[in-house]
């Protein structure tokens, strides 16, 4: 029996997201301030628990025909998206450090960056689902792309962490099209000087964060379609991962030097999902209904192993002010 996902389920979930964002910006975090590690860790746990509750309690009770396999598929997709978001977090941290964004203003940039990411991911997911439904062979292209990306990431290792915002196309385009102020104007993205509306450096940071998410979405969207082709599960697992991204940033930003082997774990996850997409027909014949559980076990096990190995092997990477590593 297939889950009877209706338009009301989509509307209800989007309404939940809008309420959560409104509470976040308008009630809980009206003033910009530095986020402490313990607070960020608590909110990360809240979002993770919300995702698990949605899979195990909410969806089974609100959607007729929702199965345990769909719950496992959702959790697999959520873990994949959250894992790939970790790499995004490290790049965002480098962008903040490069532009010397004060800690109290980082929360505001992340909020609007995440709001933009939700809209972009929604459009990309709907487009991807329609494309796969019409041209099933695009799944094999996605699988090959993920396999190639994972191998490339594995080969690049830590050298792939470098980021040069000033040389990026979005920043160069913004500098050419809009007048820019030299200094920050508080937490504002736009200010007025000598009667002219001008972008502030914080707006450049937001542009870079949005551009970074587009780049990472090129990996994460195919990866989630490698887990499931159900648009509702793809969308909801993506959204839960993105909603927890801001608190995850404040948890990982201070610990990023300790997880130098995480990139290798992420590369293996991408290679695994890519290979799974290419050989899914044969894997289903071999593993049957166990394929979903095997996928979840591999993804969680690989990410945890890479993080644990990073801590046990030591050799913390220390970053100085200019973002270089020693």
Image: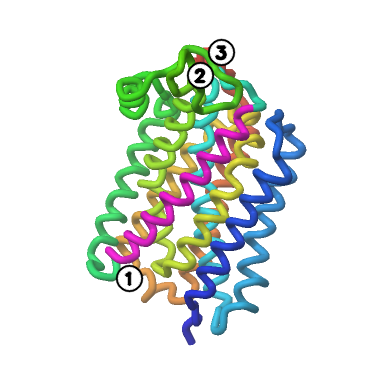
Q: Residue at x 55, y 54 (%)?
A: 79
Q: Residue at x 49, y 72 (%)?
A: 290
Q: Secondary structure at mark 2?
A: loop
Dominant SS type (magenta)? helix
Percent coordinates x, y for residue 171 in the rendering = 37, 25
Among all residues in the image, which is located at the extreme right? Answer: 38
Q: For marks 1 and 2, give the one nearer the viewer.
A: 2
Percent coordinates x, y for residue 159 in the rendering = 41, 25
Residue bearing the label numbered 3? 321
211 up-or-down from 61: above or below: above
162 up-or-down from 148: above or below: above
Marked residue nearer the N-terminal end (1 or 2): 2
Percent coordinates x, y for residue 240 in the rendering = 57, 55
Q: Secondary structure at mark 1?
A: helix
**Is there any visible trace of residue 39 in the rendered image?**
yes
Residue bearing the label numbered 1? 282
Q: Residue at x 29, y 70 (%)?
A: 133
Marked residue nearer the N-terminal end (2 or 3): 2
Q: Secondary structure at mark 3?
A: loop
Q: In the image, is residue 221 part of the stretch drawn in magenta?
A: no
Tell whether 291 sits left or right of 107.
left
Residue range highlighted in magenta: 105-131
């Amino acid at each position: 029996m297939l889950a009877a996902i209706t338009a009301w389920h989509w509307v209800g979930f989007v309404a939940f997201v809008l309420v959560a964002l409104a509470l976040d910006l308008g009630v809980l975090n009206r003033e910009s301030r530095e986020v402490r590690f313990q607070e960020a860790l608590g909110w990360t746990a809240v979002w993770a628990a919300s995702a698990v509750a949605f899979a195990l309690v909410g969806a089974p009770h609100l959607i007729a025909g929702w199965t345990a396999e769909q719950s496992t598929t959702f959790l697999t997709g959520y873990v994949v998206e959250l894992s790939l978001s970790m790499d995004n977090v490290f790049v965002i941290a480098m962008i903040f450090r490069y532009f010397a964004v004060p800690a109290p203003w980082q929360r505001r940039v992340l909020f609007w960056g995440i709001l933009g990411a939700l809209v972009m991911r929604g459009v990309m997911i709907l487009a991807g689902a329609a494309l796969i439904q019409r041209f099933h062979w695009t799944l094999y292209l996605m699988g090959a792309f993920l396999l190639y990306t994972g191998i490339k990431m594995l080969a690049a290792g830590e050298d792939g962490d470098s980021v040069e915002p000033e040389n990026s196309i979005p920043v160069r385009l913004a500098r050419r099209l809009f007048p820019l102020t030299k200094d920050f104007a508080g937490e504002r993205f736009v200010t007025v000087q000598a009667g002219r509306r001008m972008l502030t450096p914080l707006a450049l940071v937001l542009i870079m964060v949005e551009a970074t998410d587009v780049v990472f979405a090129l990996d994460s969207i195919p990866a989630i379609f490698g887990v499931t082709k159900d648009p509702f599960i793809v969308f909801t697992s993506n959204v839960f991962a993105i909603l927890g991204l801001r608190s995850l940033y404040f948890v990982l930003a201070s610990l990023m030097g300790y997880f130098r082997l995480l990139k290798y774990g992420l590369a293996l996850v991408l290679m695994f999902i890519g290979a799974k997409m290419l050989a899914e027909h044969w894997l289903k014949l071999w593993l049957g209904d166990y394929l979903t559980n095997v996928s979840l076990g591999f993804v969680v096990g690989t990410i945890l192993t890479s993080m644990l190995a990073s801590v046990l092997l030591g050799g913390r990477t220390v970053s100085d002010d200019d973002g270089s590593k020693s």
